[in-house]
Image (cartoon, rainbow, N blue to C red):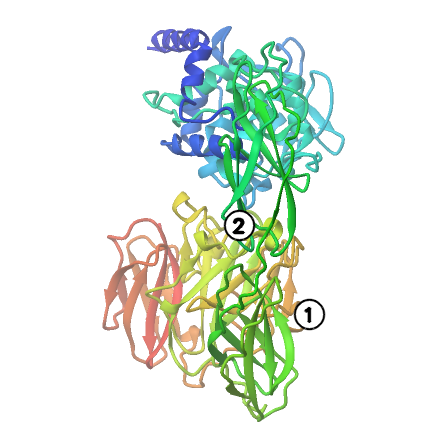
Amino acid sequence: MFIMIKKTALFLIVLFVSYNLLSQESYYNDVNLNLTGITLKEELATKIINTHTRFLFYDQIWSASKVTDVNQEDTSQVVLIYGWENGSDTDITNNRTRGIDNNGGSVGQWNREHVFSRSLGTPNLGESGPGSDAHHLRPSDVQRNSSRGNKKFAIGSGANSGASNGGWYPGDEWKGDVARMMMYLYLRYGNRCLPTNVGIGNSSATPDDMIDLFLQWNAEDPVSNFEKQRNTYHENTLNPYAQGNRNPFIDNPRLATRIWGGPEAEDSWGIYSNNDTESPSIPTNLSTANITTFSVDLSWTAATDNVAVTSYDVFVEGNLKTNTSNTSVTISGLNSNTAYALTVIAKDLANNKSNESSPVNVTTLQDTKAPSTPTNITVSNETGTSFIVSWSEAIDNTGVTAYDIYIDNTFYVSTNQINYTVTDLNISTTYSIQILAKDAAGNSSPLSTAINATTTDGSTTTANELFFSEYVEGSSNNKALEIVNLTSNDIDLSSYSIKRQSNGGVNGNDWEETVVLTLTGYTIKSNTTFVIVNGSADEQLLAKADHIQPNASETNWGAPISFNGNDPVGLFKNNILIDVIGTYNGGSSNFAKNKTLRRKSDVSQANTNFDLNNEWDVFPEDTFDDMGNHSAITLSSDSFSSNNLQFFPNPVDDVLRIRNSSNKSISNFKIIDFLGKEVFYQKNSSEEINIQKLSKGIYLLKFEVDNKTYSTKFIKK
C-alpha cells in the first residue's frame, strides 16, 4: 500500500511538471488580462473567489501537504519552507526536507506554518477561511516555525532564514514564494490579509496596501516547479484536498507588476514581454456628452497599434482618473460649474504608451437646485442637559454634503450625519428644532417644520433606550459587546442592529452594510444585559454569550463582532444610530486596541458622540470577568440569590441538576444553542434537566424567577 502511494505521488509530480503554460492560461479565459492596476486586481480576485469551491478543514491540511509539498527528488519527504540545508550538519531545524509522515508538534517533526501569521490578520485568521487556506499553509520544522512566530517579513539576504531587520527573512529560496502567497491572500480575502500587516515595507508607490518588499521579492525569486505543482493540484477538484482555485502570481509573476508596479517580474506567458516596442497611436476625436453638475460622458476614436491596443488611461486635469478597455467612459465625482481638461493615453499589451491626446475642455453644469427638506425629525434620549435629534436623509441632484441644525431659530451646528447629540442645555426646558440640507454648490433647502424637544428635570436618571455597556477587543478572536437595558420595560430587539466601520473610515469606508448583525427574535428584559460574542472566542468568554456570532464565511468571519481597536461600532434602531463606541470617520486611531471598555455606572443614556474619558473605564486586554453583569443594574431586594440557586455539574454529561434553597418558584426553562436557536423547553421546575440529546457545546440556560428572566451558561461534554 505504501509503495502504491509513492507511485501515485510520483505520477502526480510528473503530471504537474508536464502541465503546460497554455493550460495555465486557460484558467483565466474569462479574465481580461489586458487590464492593469486595480481593475485587473478586481478581475483576478473575482476569479479566485468564484473558483474557490472547496473549503478545507484545518486538519485536512496535513493530508493536502503530503501531496502538494512532496519533494520532487524523493517522494518519501516533504519540503520545508524556511529550510536550506540537506541534513548533513547537526542542526535539524534548518533542514530543507523531512519524512513525509513525520508530522506533528514535537521537536524534529514538521507542522503547518501559516505563512501569513494568524495573529497578523484583521481580525485573527483563526483555523477556517484564510486560516485554513492551503495556498499559504506550508510544512515547516516545528522549532523554526516557532522561531518565526508572528514576526513580519523583512528584507535580508542569503540562504539562511531567520530574524532580520526587525522582522523575519525567509531565505533566498523562499522569498518569492512568500511574496506570491501574500499577494494571493490579499486578492482572496481583501483587507483581512493586508500586506502592510505582514511585511515591513512601503506602500506609498502602490494604489492600495501592497508593499515594495513583496514586489521586489516577486521579481528577484522566479517561480519554481515546486510552486507550480502546488498550484496545479489545487485547481482540479477531482483531487481530494484541492480548493478549486489557483494563485495567479505563481502562474505569471508579471501580473503583480501590472497591478502594483515596481520592478518588472518574470512574464511566464510571454504575452507582456515580447519584442514589441512600437507605441499605439494617439487617441483622437475626444468628445463629451450627458454633462451634468457632477459628471460627463467622454468618448474617443480607437487608437491603432502594430499588435493591439489593450486599454486607455483617462486623465482629468492631468491626474489619472480611470483605466478602461472601452472607447468611452463616464467620469463622475466632479464639481459643479467647473472647467476641466480631459485627455486619454492608449496602451498595448507590452505596456507601450501613446502620447497624451489633445485635451477636450468641458464645464460641468451649474448646480442651482436645492436639496429636499429633511423629514421625519425625531428626538430621543432626553436628559436634563441633552437629547439626540435624528432625521431622514435628504435627496439632491448632485449630493447632500451637510445638514444645519437650528435651535430656537438660531444656527447651532453643521454635520454630515443624519443624527446629532445636542448638549449643554437647560433642565426642564422646551426647545424648537429645525434642520436644512445643503449641497456642495452651497444650495440650501428650506428649513424643516419645527418640532419641540423638552429636557428632563435633571433628577431622573432612568434610561429610556438601550446602549452599549461593555466592549472587549481581546487577543485573537476574543471580541464581544454587551448591551444593557436600564429602562423599566422589556425591549424587543427586532428593530435593533449592530454595524462596524472598518479602520475608522480610512479610504472612504462607511458603515459596512454587508456585515450588519440584526437581533430579531431576542428580547432583553428590564435591568438585564445582552452579550454578543465572536464564535471563535475563548470558552470563558463564549460561556457569557446570549448570542454567539459564528466565525464562518457566511458571517464574514464573525463580523461585525470582528472589530479591531480602530473600528467604530454602532448600535442602530430602525437603521438610525443611537449609540457608538469609537469616533465615526475618526481615522485609524487605535482608541481601544487590546483593551476592554466598560461604561461607567453613572451613564444612563446612549450617546452618538463617543466620549472615552468621561463615559468609559479602560481595562487590560482579555478582561471580561464582568461581562453580562453591568454595575448600573440594581436587582430588587426580593430577587433570587445565586448562592441559593445552583446548576451543577458544569461541564455536564447528560443531566443538569438544580439545587434551589431560595423558596422561590422557578419556571420556563429554555436552552439556547450557540446559533441562538431554542433547543429545549421545560415549563415547570424540577430537580434536574435531562440534556442527553443535546450535542457537545456551549449553551445558554434561561429561566424565570418572580416573572424576571435570568440566564446562566453551561458546557455539554
Q: SS for tag 2?
A: loop
- Position of residue 583 relative to residue 246, above or below, is below
Residue 398 place in picture, x, y as percent: 53, 59
Circle 1 is placed at which residue position? 613
Residue at 27% x, 68% y is: 687
* Amino acid tagged 2: Ile
- Are there few (<14), some (14-19), or many (20+) residues within 10 Å of tag 2? some
Residue 353 higher or lower than 546, as above or below: above
| Residue depicted at 38% across the width and 78% down the height | 490
Q: Earlier in the sequence, mark 1 or mark 2?
A: 2
In the rendered structure, the answer to whether residue 246 lies left or right of residue 426 reads left
> Where is residue 203, by image quadrant?
top right
Q: Does 574 sit above or below residue 291? A: below
In the rendered view, tell whether residue 198 sits above or below residue 110: below
- Which residue appears farthest toward the right when viewing the image? 165
Q: In which quadrant will I find the N terminus?
A: top left
Viewer-nearest residue: 156 or 601: 156
Residue 52, position as x, y percentages in the image: 40, 31
Q: Secondary structure at mark 1?
A: helix
Separation of marks 1 and 2 at Cα, in angstroms: 50 Å
Residue located beneath label 2 in the image: 291
Rendered image quadrant of residue 49: top left
Residue positioned 60% across, 84% down in the render = 407
**Residue 602 can be seen, yes or no:** no
Please state which amino acid type lies under the numbered disc 1.
Answer: Asn
Q: In the drawing, does residue 472 fall left or right of residue 620?
A: left
Which of the two discs, 1 and 2, sits closer to the camera? 2
Q: Assess disc 1: are there few (<14), some (14-19) or many (≥20) residues with their C-alpha within 10 Å of its C-alpha.
A: few
